Image (cartoon, rainbow, N blue to C red):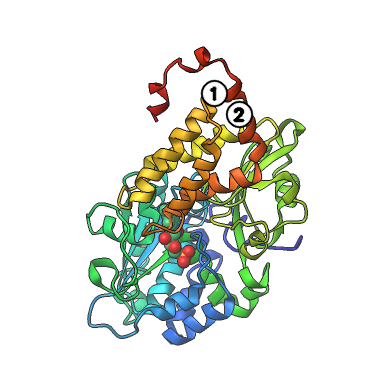
């Protein structure tokens, strides 16, 4: 593991600059792919074992093979850079440090699936990164790497940048499609799946930015090379994001399956002020949290995280120390989901607000004995009962925090119940101002 060379965040000065990128072999994989058949490219990606880095870990080669090669309608690629999940900030690092590797992957994806138009959907708040990405794209156009008859071939593809407007739900792939179409960003029912009925009803593939940034190294070095990096069932490197009570927060590219303790202590410099760990969120705010007892020997990839009832998500790890008020953290996370729910499905629209109200009163010393069961009940009724996975994302932190940190919830409720009534009625209405 120690001789691991980063695949995406290479330590080359000014690598974001097209001249530097090309001097170091950049766009060579695309030139190689131009000489391959679409099937050969897709087979190489399948062989690599690459799984999507947008959270669901779907095998990328398989997804590409769902795209009909022949279609009388236009086909589209949507590159998902919405990145609005709290604790996730890895795609931003790619836009800043290595935008051309992502653009090269986008071109190869278009080549493999016979796509002539790609949209990059980027989080609207990432304004400086939108400017950086636009510059990279303009430079690629100027070099004849994007546009008509690329590098004198009969392959043409245009790439457009589409700015989001601050809605987390637009990262969900079908809400993203609606948003690009100019509609309200609400998820669609599936089926039909985007591969057959996506953008404007046309065949569409949606891939995460990090997923696409892995493509050119796969074509350069072969799928087999990639499949041997990290954990076999979740091959490659991951851009782990470290934040919270950690000495050296940031993005660390390491092989999948890196030990969580290595990430925290070896790379992240340990917990601030040498405090003990209370809770860890392993992959963005929606992933079920871990207790301090679960982290020893735990490898950070999707397969190993399943053994502690969690998932890798976007690899955004939040470390929280022994002083952390678990109820407050979960309330804050729930506040985010309450605010971001698109309101389309009743369990999510109503349930997120109910969870927040209950958490708020427990936190403010007005909890009732029955509140923990009620909270579990609401979370269970959201999970699995919505059009998209947003409902699960909102329910999991609540459900699993109760399961894993029950004493913290019980303590707050006990203290609430024991509190003299006069202290509790400071303002019931306040609890509803969420
Ligand atoms: C509420 C919600 C938000 C999401 N946000 C993102 C996002 O910001 N970026 C992303 O790539 N995937 C996001 N996803 C996952 C996408 O729906 C989709 O699975 C992904 O973009 C597919 O790309 P991949 O196969 O390369 O991972 C989100 C999913 C949900 C349910």
* Distance from mark 2 CB to nearest ligand 1 atom below 8 Å: no
Q: Is residue 34 left or right of residue 301?
A: left
* 197, above or below 136, in the image: below
User: Percent x, y for residue 378?
Assistant: 46, 46
- Using the image, tell me which numbered label, if any, was put on residue 279: none
- Using the image, tell me which numbered label, if any, was put on residue 412: 2
* 312, above or below 276, in the image: below
Name the secondary structure under disc 1: loop
Q: Nearer the viewer, residue 370 or 92?
A: 370
The N terminus: image quadrant: bottom right
Which residue lies at the image location 66% right of the left edge and 73% below the top edge?
232
- Using the image, tell me which numbered label, if any, was put on residue 365: 1
Which residue lies at the image location 38% right of the left edge and 57% below the top edge?
386
Q: Quadrant of residue 329?
A: top right
Which residue lies at the image location 62% right of the left edge and 68% below the top edge?
234
Residue 124 in sight from this viewpoint: no
Marks 1 and 2 close (CB-CB < 8 Å): yes
Quadrant containing ligand 1 reads bottom left
User: Percent x, y for residue 299?
Assistant: 71, 59
* 61, above or below 185, in the image: below
* 280, above or below 313, in the image: above
């Amino acid at each position: 593991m120690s001789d691991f060379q980063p695949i995406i965040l290479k330590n080359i000065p000014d690598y974001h600059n097209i001249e530097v990128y090309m001097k170091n072999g950049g766009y060579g994989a695309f030139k190689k792919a131009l000489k391959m058949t679409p099937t050969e490219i897709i087979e190489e990606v399948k062989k690599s074992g690459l799984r999507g880095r947008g959270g669901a870990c779907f095998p990328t080669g398989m997804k590409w093979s769902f795209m009909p090669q022949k279609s009388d309608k236009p086909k589209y690629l949507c590159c998902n850079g919405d990145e609005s999940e709290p604790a996730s900030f890895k795609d931003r690092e790619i836009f800043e440090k290595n935008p051309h590797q992502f653009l090269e992957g986008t071109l190869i994806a278009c080549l493999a699936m016979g796509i002539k138009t790609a949209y990059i959907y980027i989080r609207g708040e990432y304004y400086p990164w939108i400017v950086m990405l636009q510059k990279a794209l303009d430079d690629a156009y100027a070099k004849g790497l994007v546009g008509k008859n690329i590098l004198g071939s009969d392959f043409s593809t245009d790439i457009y940048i589409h700015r989001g407007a601050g809605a987390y739900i637009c990262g969900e792939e079908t809400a993203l499609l609606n948003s690009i179409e100019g509609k309200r960003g609400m998820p669609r029912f599936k089926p039909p799946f985007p591969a057959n009925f996506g953008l404007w009803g046309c065949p569409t593939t949606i891939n995460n930015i990090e997923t696409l940034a892995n493509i050119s190294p796969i074509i350069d070095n072969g799928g087999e090379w990639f499949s041997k990096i990290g954990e076999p069932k979740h091959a490659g490197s991951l851009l782990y994001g470290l934040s919270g009570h950690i000495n050296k927060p940031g993005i660390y590219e390491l092989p999948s399956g890196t030990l969580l303790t290595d990430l925290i202590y070896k790379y992240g410099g340990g917990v601030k002020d040498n405090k003990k760990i209370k809770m860890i969120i392993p992959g963005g705010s929606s992933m079920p949290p871990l207790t301090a007892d679960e982290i020893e020997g735990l490898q950070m990839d999707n397969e190993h995280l399943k053994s502690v009832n969690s998932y890798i998500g976007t690899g955004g790890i939040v470390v929280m120390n022994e002083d952390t008020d678990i109820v407050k953290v979960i309330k804050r996370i729930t506040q985010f989901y309450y605010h971001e729910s698109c309101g389309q499905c009743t369990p999510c629209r109503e349930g997120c607000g109910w969870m927040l109200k209950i958490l708020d009163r427990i936190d403010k010393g007005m909890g009732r004995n029955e509140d923990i069961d009620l909270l579990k009940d609401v979370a269970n009724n959201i999970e699995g009962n919505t059009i998209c996975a947003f409902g699960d994302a909102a329910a999991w932190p609540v459900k699993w925090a109760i399961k894993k940190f029950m004493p913290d919830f019980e303590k707050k409720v006990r203290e609430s119940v024991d509190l003299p009534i006069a202290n509790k009625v400071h303002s019931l209405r306040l609890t509803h101002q969420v």
